[in-house]
Image: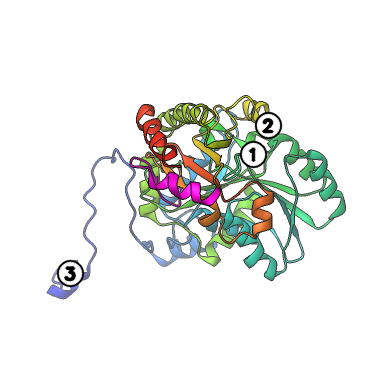
Amino acid sequence: MKNLQFGSQCVRAARDTKTTRPHQLPIYATSSFAFDDLPEGMAVFSGEQAGHLYSRFGNPTIDAVAEKIAQLEMHGSGEEGHGLFCSSGMSAISTLCLGLLQPGDAILTQPNLYGGTDELFRKVLQPLGFEVILADLSDLNAVAKALEQHAAIRMVYFETPANPTLSCVDIKAVSALAHSHQAIAVADNTFATPYLQQPLLLGADYVVHSTTKYLNGHGNSTAGAIVGRDKEAMQERVFPALKLIGTNGSPFEAWLLNNGMKTLELRMERHCQNAVKVAEWLTQQPQVSRVNYPGLPDHPDHQLARRQMRHFGGVVSFELKGGLHAGRQFVEGLQLCTLAPTMGDVDTLVMHPATMSHLKVPVEQRQAAGISDGLIRLSVGIEASNDILSDLERGVSRI
């Protein structure tokens, strides 16, 4: 358009001068998408023609990354998964629950959940009319009994490995039990990532991720993801919940996540290698009464983890004999490891669950689940293993 006034020319969008395909995924930093004419807009809005409308409904950067995560979860199967990108791991969980469940439905889950998920279930979903039932999901008899006694259970939700006790759930067996009672099985795969574990290929119906953690890996993005096998349910129930509640992620977060995922395999290999060395070292320390890591042969879920995981993960937790005081002394002696309420970054992170991630979990439930005042969680990074061990030595020597 020619002969515009200066101010109008300022407002006009710059012309896209792209002539060849970009090597990297672009950031589509636009809230909405324009149509060539009204018939095109009508066709896209009605669903007769594929197209983007508004970034809360979908965006090329977001859609590309959601599809990539779905491909990783289904990798090697020849089957198709369907992904959605959310603003956080918690928004992924809440979107899935609100999209698939109705008031009066019950969720069967484990008492040793991540503290934020436990709070979501107790403080948000329960007041809305959703029942939450706790059972030891590593005990298949307990799972079967709960399903038989509570006909309202429509979802079995589990973390494996669990945060922060590293206990594992038999994905195939628990999913089969859920299906036998017309319930869906949902796995939080944040700790393992699809490189180490693929719950959908073991029978789970949906997977959720806090992509903030290992999938991104660099601590510079907060986002989440949902992947499901049922295309119709994802399109007709889960996506409307995301769209209408507004739990979608942003294009920039998706772009950061895409960059992080490029090195996922390399990072996870190093995380796991270092975690094994750290776990074995901790078992030799007199200040430590227990080490939780499924890679240790004496871990109660070692054989199960061997069956359903490629490696044993990058998170280790351990019990200090001196409780909270010992934990404080340990953390104050560290120089390399960082005290931070997250995990999955390339650097080693330490956290005290009882006063941080699980502070709002009822004390009796927390302690019964093995999350005591002396429990320390380590997200083992990709630094040189000797440097990590030297720093841990500084920590335990302070106790």
Task: Locate residue 187 relative to residue 139 in the image: left or right.
Answer: left
Nearer-the-camera pick, 32 or 329 = 329
- Circle 3 packing at 10 Å, graded few (<14), some (14-19), many (20+), is few
Label 2 crowd bin: few (<14), some (14–19), many (20+), radius 10 Å: some
Q: Where is residue 233 in the image (x, y as percent from the top left)?
A: 65, 52
- Secondary element at tag 1: loop
User: Disc 2, disc 1: CB below 8 Å?
Assistant: yes
Q: Quadrant of residue 288?
A: top right
Residue at 34% across / 60% down in the picture?
30
Residue at label 1?
A: 167
Q: What residue type is labelled 1?
A: Ser
- Total count of labels: 3
In the image, residue 255 lies in the stretch drawn in magenta:
no
Q: Where is residue 174 in the image (x, y as percent from the top left)?
A: 74, 40
Residue numbers of the magenta segment: 323-342
C-alpha separation, residue under disc 3 versus residue under disc 1: 59 Å
Instruction: Residue 64: tell me if it is visible.
Output: no
Q: Name the residue under label 2.
A: 300
- Where residue 220 appears, x then y in whole percent? 35, 50
Who comes first in sequence, dot 3 or dot 1? 3
Q: Is mark 2 on a helix, strand or loop?
A: loop
Closer to the N terminus: mark 3 or mark 2? 3
